[in-house]
Image: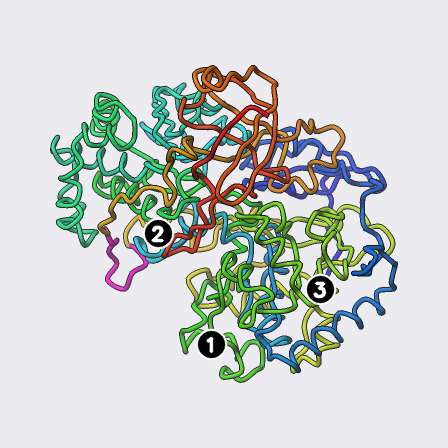
Amino acid sequence: MRPAPVSSSGATETHCPYCSLQCGMRLRGSRTPVVEAWEEFEVNEGGLCRKGWNAAGLYGSRERLTTPLRRDRETGEWSPLSWDEALDLVAEGLRAVRAERGADAVAVFGGGGLTNEKAYTLGKFARVALGTSQIDYNGRWCMSSAASAGIRAFGLDRGLPFPLADVEETDVLVLVGSNLAETMPPAARHLDRLRARGGKVVVVDPRRTPTAERADVLVQPVPGTDLALALGVLHLLVAAGAVDEDYLAARTTGWEQVRESAAAWWPERVERVTGVAADEVRALADLLAGAGRVMALTARGAEQHSTGSDTVLAWINVTLALGMVGRPGAGYGCLTGQGNGQGGREHGQKADQLPGYRRIDDPAARAHVASVWGVDPDSLPGPGRSAYELLDALGTTEGPSAMLVLGSNIVVSAPNADHVRARLESLDLLVVADVVMSETAAMADVVLPVTQWAEETGTMTNLEGRVILRQRAVRPPAGVRSDLDLLVDLAERLGAPVPFERDPEAVFAELGRASAGGPADYSAITYDRIRAEQGVFWGGERLFADTFAHPDGRARMLVVEHRGAAEQPCAEYPVHLTTGRVLAQYQSGAQTRRVRSLPDTGAFVEMHPLLAGRLGVADGEPVRLRTRRGRMVAPARVVGTVRPDTVFVPFHWVGVNRLTNDALDPASRMPEFKVCAVEVTPA
């Protein structure tokens, strides 16, 4: 691979390590890199959030892992190993488990922050070097509901089928379960520009978030009822004669059945279910009916439910009924969360997937990918377990007894986390590759120190489907290797039948060949083209203008019914618990909590003054949360911005996911992170 080119200013052009915007930035300096603005990159126009400006905060940190470590299970003490010793030990352990219990006794768990090259190689490593079907990744807990709905409705999943800047051109933007002003702050400028030209912003969220403060309308439903709200809006659009019958006849199937299902959702029924006043539902429907262009964007607040994929389908039905999907400045999109949440779900680290967003149970897909890899299609395993189901099976008679983890802090991020911790403890061998000693790494038998974002080169695919290039700007510390290096070296030790590439540009070229002809086809994309064009949209800049990806070219409108959350409040657990992110932290916090310039407040419990008054709790006083799965204590934040029947806790710290529900969406296998029943008491 050639050295990364530098800008005329002498700095390396690269991208932020955090969210799916993948904001452009420049890094100057090799020992203590300094972040500078890259104004020419159009996604963020030089703007960064606090996390982005402090993205280099881990360089030189004493908490960086710089040597492989082995943990003594009896004493808990760590001892350093050479890389050869560590890899030999891991390979020996994996071979022993496979010999005793078969290939599926070994599991692999990836992450939505891995580069495309790493995600691709991880999937290939699992299927070819290990021969296991037991691979999935934490992106299952991020994007799977929207992905499932997009595939069913449009025949294709790309989070945003248009550039993010198109948001500015719509007349009414509906954000369902998104707090982008905190989760991706540089994107919030599009809301301001939209409003400046006379457009309206609607936020659907149980909390009055910083995003809602920048909106024209806030709708605050009971957590887990966004689907019912969409059905009520569709009911009123039909009643008002606002649906585009010509568009529906020409470009969709299933409309009559969807129309009939929405007939039962009159505004007063919606009010009883969602807590949103009937007049507010009518006002929202009137706003959409009178707009020339409408755009609906969903995020985790709507998707991380046991009904998440149906909720997304319900809002897709609204945009299709209005004839918006495929029109400029209109339609449906999903705000992807993790840095490579899009690319990470396209190239093979999902349980049911091969590169190019191909299905692993499709004979033609298996034949194509096997030909690129140089193996027999029949040697490839079939579909495996989804992420939570994989973790739930660890250490059981039928489940894996060894696992390799890359790019995921499972102990903090998994639902029903105490149960997941117990399953991890039951493994015979746990190997974790990470930058720091995360809570999951601390449980491992072997920890492998790996490079972080600016120490390596690789591609990411942002929320728009824009493939961008992170370029190496600094040398990694001595003793640190890339994930690609360790996978190649392990594959050799395991006797893989074919060689693995370790150069990221060569890996990307192979990924292009493997994805060629698939739904997510990267075969025409190269590193040089990405540099020249500041990113390349796979599938084209805008999708669905003339046709959808189903064989008949039509979108599918599917009947969905409101079922509600899997766990409803009761006498013992009378309050709704919902979770989310805060501005200064990211995901499990393994990296951001270690950056000194980012405020680390710890977890807190946001509650309404009415609830605090009933409990006799003042602002700042500790409260105890208890669900059917676990408990935690954190200080109260008494605010008037959350529903009185709901508490909110951010998930960046150990604790909250001990409480969350592991009920799964039947289509996407997404756990219900965003709502469960909780008891709240003074501590």
Q: In front of the other: label 2 or label 3? A: 2
User: 344 left or right of 236?
Assistant: right
Q: In which quarter of the image is the N terminus?
A: bottom right
Tell me the SS state at disc 3.
loop
Label drawn at residue 149: 2
Disc 2 crowd, CA 10 A, few/some/many (<14, 14-19, 20+): many
Residue type at mark 3 is: Asp
State whether residue 681 is above or below residue 445.
above
The front one of 607 and 470 is: 607
Q: Residue extending furthest front?
A: 572
State the separation of the CA atoms marked 2 and 1: 24 Å
Q: Dot 3 corresponds to which residue?
A: 503
User: 126 left or right of 644?
Assistant: right
Q: Is residue 464 magenta?
A: no
Magenta range: 548-557
Residue type at mark 1 is: Arg
